Structures are given as C-alpha cells and as structure tokens.
Image (spheres, helix red, strand yellow):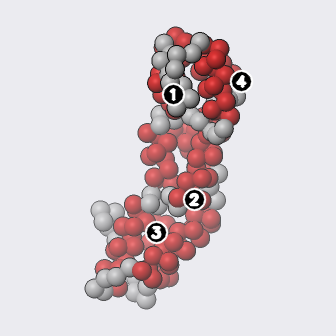
Amino acid sequence: MLFMKQRNESELLRLVAAWCSSGERCISEVRKKLTAAGASPEVAERMMARLLEEKFVDESRYCRSFVKDKFRFNGWGRIRIRHELQRKGIASPVIAEALDELDEEACRSALSEMLRAKKRTTKGHSDYDIFLKLYRFARGRGFEGALISACLKPLFNETYDVDEEV
C-alpha cells in the first residue's frame, strides 16, 4: 500500500492527490485512506479541504461516474445504485441529481435485454415460476417493480401480477 510508512503532511497530500487523480473518489473513501495512513483528524480535515478546493475530490462528479459505471458495467438499477451511494455517505440531493441523468429508455432497453438473456438459462416448473425468478433477479439488481413488470410482459404470453413483496 502506498501510505504504509510514516510520511510528512505535504508528502501525504501529494500521494493522496495522485491517488485521487487516478480515479474518481468520494469524501468517505479519501477520509478512510487518510485515517489508514495515520493522519490525525486535524491534518485529515486540512487535507480534505485542500483536495476539495483543488477539485481532486468532487462528490457530484464521483456520483455521475459511479451511476454510469454501475449501470453500464454491473447492470445495476436505480435502487441498488442509490443504496450503494448512500452507504458511502453521499447526500441524497447529489445522488438524485446523478440518477436523473440516467436515460429512462436506456434503462428499459438494458433491463429488457438482460431479462431476455436470463430467461434462456432459467429453469422452472411453469412460466409463472420462471416469471417470478426473473422478477426476483431484476429486483436483486436494483430495478423498480413497475419497470420490471413492463419489461417482463413481452416475454410471456400471459400477464402475471406480482406483489411488491416478491
């Protein structure tokens, strides 16, 4: 790890700034890194202020990047993305702003394709059983119930109703 040996404040700031430059970081990740490096709370706060001022750390930019990446590469829905960002201590308005940038049609299209592919490999005793498995799969990925139902309807001849409790 970069920060294991004892370093002075300016050297630590330089290393953390380089680490932040290598990829988007949120405030909680940087604070954890500074604490692990042995920085006192006062030093850590001074460094955080400087990193924020110089735009090495930007929660809004981090959120937008996180939303795009998790949707595109992990196939996560809005609910799961929101939960993960909240776990990182990011403010709800910042999260909402980043999630608003997700295109509704792109979400629908990605989920439809994901469900179509998953249906080919899902086994069940009946169509309803497969429908429920696919619904649970999509809920686990963090997609909204109404969107899941809308994407599942074209895949089945019958229309099934699903409680939000499934």
What's the CA distance linking mark 1 and mark 4?
A: 18 Å
Instruction: Say which of marks 4 and 3 sits in front.
Output: 4
- What's the amino acid at mark 3? Ile
- Counting other residues with Cα less than 10 Å from the Cα at mark 1, is it few (<14), some (14-19), or many (20 or more)? some
User: In this figure, which residue is indicated by the disc labeled 3?
Assistant: 148
Q: Earlier in the sequence, mark 2 or mark 4?
A: 4
Q: Which residue is mark 2?
A: 73
Element type where label 3 sits in the image: helix
Quadrant showing the C terminus: bottom left
- Given residues 75 and 100, the one toward you in this image is 75
Question: Mark 2, mark 3: which one is toward the viewer?
Answer: 2
Q: Amino acid at mark 2?
A: Phe
Amino acid found under the numbered disc labelled 4: Glu
Which quadrant would residue 126 be assigned to in this image?
bottom left
Other residues around mark 4 within 10 Å, as few (<14) / some (14–19) / many (≥20):
few
Mark 3 / mark 1, whichever is N-terminal: 1
State the image coordinates of residue 26 (x, y, percent, origin top left): 56, 34
User: What separation in Å lies between label 3 and label 1 (alpha carbons)?
Assistant: 38 Å
Tag nearer the camera, 3 or 1: 1
Residue tagged 1: 33
Label 2's element? helix
Counting other residues with Cα less than 10 Å from the Cα at mark 3, is it few (<14), some (14-19), or many (20 or more)? many
Q: Disc 2 versus disc 3: distance between alpha carbons?
A: 19 Å
Name the mark on residue 165.
none
> Is residue 116 rendered to the left or right of residue 160?
right
